[in-house]
Image (cartoon, rainbow, N blue to C red):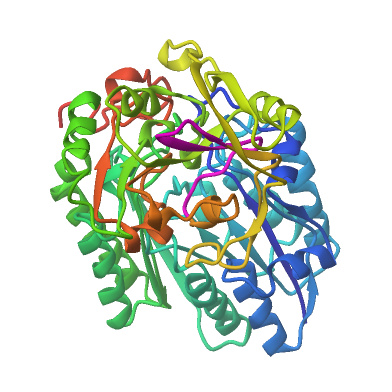
Amino acid sequence: MRIVIAMMKHETNTFSPVPTPLARFEAWGLHRGQGVIDAYAKTRMPIGAYLKIARELGAEVVTPIAAEAMPSGRVTREAYEALASPIVAAVAAGCDAVMLDLHGAMVAEDFPDGEGELLRRVRAAAPGVPICVTCDLHANLTQAMVENCDALIGYKTYPHVDMYEVAEQVGRILVAKLQGRADPVMAWGNRPILAQTLRMGTDDEPMKSLQQMTRDLERDGVLAATFFGGFPMADIADAGVSAITIADRDAAKAERARDALLDAAWERRAEFVYEGRPLAATVAAASRLQNSIPTGKPVLLLDHADNVGSGGTEDVMTVIAEVLRQNLPDVAVAAVWDPEAVKAMKAAGLGATVTLQLGGRSAMPSIGRKGEPLRVTGTVRSLTDGTWVIEGPMYTGVTVHTGPTAVLDTGRMQIVIVSQHHEPFDRGIFTANGIDPTTRKYLIIKSRIHYRAGFAPIASHTFTCDGAGVTTSDNTQLVFKDVRRPMYPLDPM
């Protein structure tokens, strides 16, 4: 048996000014051939599960490419073709099955449905070969994606700590089809809800109950059930919540399960909308806690509007500036993207005092903002190459590359400054740069929900800080042109 296993992942924020050429995939980690196996076989990533299944089958494995990039703007046509072509070529060369790890919200310059186009090509290259797909919880599911594979599943957790498990689940459904033990049929659909990412945490309602519904349906005999929150920062027709279910030879059963999920989501649509408050008031509320913060339990300040994990520029200084203005003590920040600042700090050397115009390198025309750097003075406390391994529970075992990285100590605040974008969901972003986050009173983290994987266990309190950026949860700052209408909450429904 010959199985093609590949990964092609990107969450595209169409409002983001950050470009997505092939180099952005190479920065996170682009692997080919044996390099794919070396990079992922011992991780808790979907490819790790696929490789395990292939080993059990004694199959020959073909791994043309594994590529992922931090979320950003549209994928360039050159990058898209460079990633998709090796996968299609490997399938066309002959195989018995295809196992793909995709995201589900890739928007390329030529293809608003990046995954649908890839799967269309793969299916055309091998019409009779079974294909399974693992997608992110934030996938914007499309007809093209579903009709060009045999079994598709998504994560049930956000933060995504079940990637390995769901990949193994869908992989075993594919094996059952290959061996004639099952004939999976899928039912899918969507509802016009542009859910906000801050309201998709699976420890919170309404997602907590909806994901429990998927597990209950699976216990009742559905092979797989997935509810997708969707990715609202991709301004495409298919953005929004969706569901897909898989049953064995029973289309009616799959359809009933799908409808139950979608109807439940529609009834609770108001709960998918985030209600914010003024930034100064949020920081003031956090400041009032400073004398009662337990040792080893910092307060988390989430700079969610500049979350690079949703396509933010990671150099908006609004929240950092407000925290400095209100004189909060003992703060650590992860992270600010500013390669030029890192160069200046490296030239000055460890222990040097430097004054920088930090951040603000990126204009954000989609929300009408120019880059606004912040003048800061501090000491260079750390200089590293930015390479470290994630301990988990999310992306466990994956090597991170933030490029040349530095820490600036202003006295009240230590700021991790990176040369390559990275969302801080693992404590390694601090510890690899000489900061023990448990010893700080406050942590500013440019993240929405993924921070919970590494930081929720040590947090005493958490505040969402409504700063500026292209991952804003304020829909009035965004101009949606291509999403289907009417769409809740953009339209009264």
In magenta segment, residue 375: no
Q: Camera-side residue: 240 or 341? A: 341
| Image x and y of residue 25, in percent | 70, 43
Q: Whole-percent x and y of residue 42?
A: 66, 75
Q: Compared with residue 427, is residue 314 higher up or lower down, i.e. above or below?
A: above
Residue 258, by quadrant, is: bottom left
Residue at 31% across, 64% down: 255
Front residue of 388/304: it is 388
Residue shown at 41% from the left, 60% from the top: 453
The stretch of residues the image draws in magenta is: 408-425
> In the picture shown, does residue 478 fall above or below 21?
above
In depth, the one of 327 and 57 nearer the eye is 327
Q: Which residue is drawn at the image coordinates 60% and 26% (left, top)?
A: 353
Q: Quadrant of residue 263?
A: bottom left
Image position of 344 (left or right of 144): right
Query: Could you tell whether 294 is left or right of 4 in the image?
Result: left
The answer to whether residue 491 is visible is no
Residue 261, position in %: x, y? Answer: 25, 60
Q: Is residue 14 visible?
A: yes
Quadrant (top left, top right, bottom left, bottom right) of the C terminus? top left
* Lateral position of residue 209 relative to residue 8, left or right: left
In the depicted view, which residue is nearer to us: 26 or 155?
Answer: 26
